[in-house]
């Protein structure tokens, strides 16, 4: 999944809390949200108003939660684990580690693997 596909999937599945999201979908969404928030803050600063950033943050809030829940589903974990982010420092670290790990191979209790039918990654040669 590329950057544009991930953003499209994020906005089209903004209320989908039942399927699975692969690593690239999640991390491209995070990259989009960070870049968008920086651009919105710059626009607010240049215009001398506070309006663009809150609107952008509101627009990506629910899709961000949904893609996070779907990413946890790909790891065969409940979406409720996202509440771990409220535990200072430790919760965020645990979630980042989980979000960086490869998802469950094949189907799990949250559905078929989003990578089903795609070619396995080519292993890199050892250096």
Image (tube, rainbow, N blue to C red):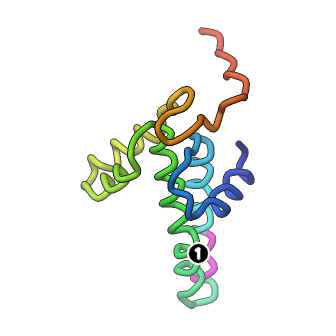
Image x and y of residue 106, in percent: 57, 27
Image x and y of residue 80, in percent: 35, 53
Which residue is depicted at the point 52% across and 52% down?
Answer: 18
**SS class, disc 1:** helix
* 103 left or right of 11 in image: left
| Neighbours of disc 1 within 10 Å: few (<14), some (14-19), many (20+) | some
Residue at the extreme top of the image, as rendered: 126
Q: Is residue 89 above or below residue 1?
A: below
Image x and y of residue 53, in percent: 55, 78
Q: Is residue 1 magenta?
A: no
Question: 86 or 111: which is nearer to us?
Answer: 111
Image x and y of residue 54, in percent: 52, 80
Question: 57 or 125: which is nearer to us?
Answer: 57
Question: 46 or 52: which is nearer to us?
Answer: 52
Task: Specify the segment rendered in magenta.
Answer: 39-44
Q: Is residue 42 magenta?
A: yes
Specify the quadrant that holds the N terminus.
Answer: top right
Specify the quadrant that holds the C terminus.
Answer: top right
Magenta stretch, main secondary structure class: helix
């Amino acid at each position: 999944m590329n950057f544009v596909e991930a953003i499209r999937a994020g906005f089209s599945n903004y209320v989908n809390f039942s399927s699975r999201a692969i690593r690239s979908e999640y991390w491209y969404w995070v990259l989009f949200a960070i870049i968008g928030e920086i651009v919105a803050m710059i626009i607010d600063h240049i215009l001398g108003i506070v309006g663009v950033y809150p609107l952008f943050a509101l627009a990506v809030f629910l899709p961000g939660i949904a893609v996070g829940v779907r990413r946890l589903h790909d790891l065969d974990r409940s979406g409720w684990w996202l509440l771990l982010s409220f535990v200072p420092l430790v919760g965020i670290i645990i979630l980042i580690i989980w979000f960086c790990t490869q998802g469950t191979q094949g189907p799990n209790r949250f559905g078929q693997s989003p990578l089903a039918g795609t070619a396995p990654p080519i292993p890199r040669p050892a250096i």
